Amino acid sequence: MNNSISAEHNLSSCHTSTNILIVDDILENIRLLSSILEKHGYHTRKATSGKMALTAVQADPPALILLDIRMPDINGYEVCQQLKANPKTNNIPVIFLSAADDISDKIQGFQAGGVDYITKPFHIDEVLARVEHQLTIIKAHKTISDLNSRLEERVKERTQQLEMANTKLLKMAFQDSLTKLPNRALLMKELWQAIEKQIANPNHKFAVLYLDCDRFKIVNDSLGHLAGDELLIALTQRLQTILNEQDLLARLGGDEFVILLTKITDQPYVTAIVDNIFNRFQEPFFLREREIFISFSIGVVIDSSHYRDPETVLRHADIAMYKAKSLGKHQYQIFAPFMYEEACQRLQLETELRKCIQHSEFQLYYQTIIELETGKIVGVEALVRWHHPTLGWISPTQFIPIAEETGLIIQIGEWILKQACYQLRNWQLEKIVDTSFYISVNVSAYQFSQSKFIQQLDEILAETQLSPQCLRLEITETAIMDNTSSAAMVIDNIRQRNIQLSIDDFGTGYSSLSYLHSFPVDNLKIDRSFINRLQDNTSSLSMVQAMIQIAQNMGMNIIAEGIETPEQWEQLKLLNCPFGQGFLFSQPLEPEKIANLIISSHSL
Ligand code: C2E
Ligand code: MG
Ligand code: MG
């Protein structure tokens, strides 16, 4: 075979690490190729037969193979095919060494898996160019595969990060951020499962407790929201110690929590847990060096058998909680269908109440207040009346609480106060009463706690020209106790204006006279529940007697409410009770009828 060598190739490209296998049965060829390549920095190995080539490749795979076609044992095509069939070696590029004019050799070479060919006789530049070209391709392949694997790694890393972020998001979506308890969304999911389990097997009963802290707002208002948050975390921890592992405690938001009990045996099992909660919360919390007592109103759904969706379960538990709250807080109520009816009625009343403010369906009635010794009418109490065009008369005991909850009481209360002041001023101008006669107006706790209340009062007195001495305001004990800090200021302002204050329904609220030292009031109105038990109950008698004595010692006046019989009147006189009101003297009446009553009493 002829070999020709062209001009010297420069040595600039150094390929010391590249190892090239030259396979040819003619040693002369091998020597020639190897000298060209070695001169240019390549490292070469030699094989003089196909078999030898295969062994050499197995022992140490080269970067590139220059493969002669015609060899005595295994020809170049076969060697190439065998290499391509083996996954370990199929990546090694093979350049065939072929005669220049043999086209079919070249085609067959490509078919066998070769990547290029070098024609004999060898030409240095061609040899180098083709070898370098293949090595560049190898390098490019390697760069691509490196990039690929780096990319794969990045993708893997990002996927992991995304998965972590997803888990975190999922956790956040189902967790209350303050207490780390399950939130409403998770509770709903768990409730669904509980319902489905119960449908599949009626023995899998569940129960729901809806907890609302009583008067939590006071903590927030007096100690600040941060302290409120601390307290929520502390009470969460206490609740958790009461529950079993399988029970779910969730926070709905604010001071509302829900407990889902899924392994319940019977009703006593559930009520025992409720009792346990009440017992454990008899102990105070210590917050910012203060002792704080927290109690709950709890609504319970026990009979879970007919529920098909979590919203209804929760709504019913909420309605029962609301019932517990309206019955005086710090107690529990088990949901019963009548509560749902009540809630619907409330909602209807609320809607009607909003409408009626525009239609002014309110009226003020007045009930006389009597000096018990003489029977003289000394004043009147204004009592609001609502006559609805289709629902008829609606009692203030029904709609005032709704008005308070919805804030509508501010508007209604302002109207009542103005109306009452105008009424008395008119009677004064008509000389029906003199200036010693007073009007007593009920002020709801919500109204009392509003910062604008005093301003409202001033405006009404200015507008109606009524002297403040003729006005009395009736508030309940809760109005003071629920807003102790603001109450002191309001009371101060009221007293500065010479307006008298009365505690209404005394004996039904906190029943403690101790606060009267810090919140001085002028009159105590003894609740009618004490008066109507006077005759048949000696303890009532002594209670009323004690109230009268204490009030008198503190310089307060007493007004007995709900006097219905002459016997009650007599007894109260004997107890030295100075004033009273009740059906015995007059029902609450329209202004004209009351005016007549007052006028006719003048002639007595
Ligand atoms: P209250 O201020 O204690 O008013 C006395 C309630 O007892 C009145 O009921 C009156 O009709 C009733 N009453 C008076 N004498 C007797 C009696 O001899 N026997 C019986 N059984 N009842 C008697 P009313 O008018 O239904 O008002 C109930 C409550 O609604 C009031 O209790 C008061 O808390 C509230 N309320 C009434 N009017 C107003 C108002 O204008 N503003 C506000 N904020 N609350 C009002
Ligand atoms: Mg009253
Ligand atoms: Mg009363």
Image (cartoon, rainbow, N blue to C red):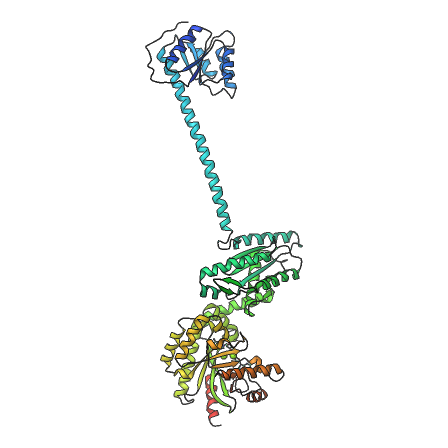
Q: How many marks?
A: 0
Asked whether residue 165 appears in the rendered view, the answer is yes
Relative to 99, is 157 above or below?
below
Placement of the N terminus among the 4 image quadrants: top left
Asked whether residue 588 appears in the rendered view, the answer is no
Q: Nearer the viewer, residue 275 or 434?
A: 275
Q: Nearer the viewer, residue 586 or 93?
A: 93
Relative to 144, is 574 above or below?
below
Image side of residue 513 versus residue 489, left or right: right
Find the residue positioned furthest to the top: 1
Residue at point 54% right, 77% down? 507
Residue 329 drawn at (x, y percent)? 55, 68
Relative to 424, is 481 above or below?
above
Find the residue positioned furthest to the front: 289
Residue 112 drawn at (x, y percent)? 48, 15
Residue 401 drawn at (x, y percent)? 50, 71
Q: Nearer the viewer, residue 547 or 117?
A: 547
Residue 594 drawn at (x, y percent)? 47, 86
Image side of residue 503 versus residue 459, left or right: right
Residue at point 48% right, 92% down? 601
Location of residue 530 (image quadrant)? bottom right
Image side of residue 146 versus residue 235, left or right: left
Location of residue 407 (image quadrant)? bottom left
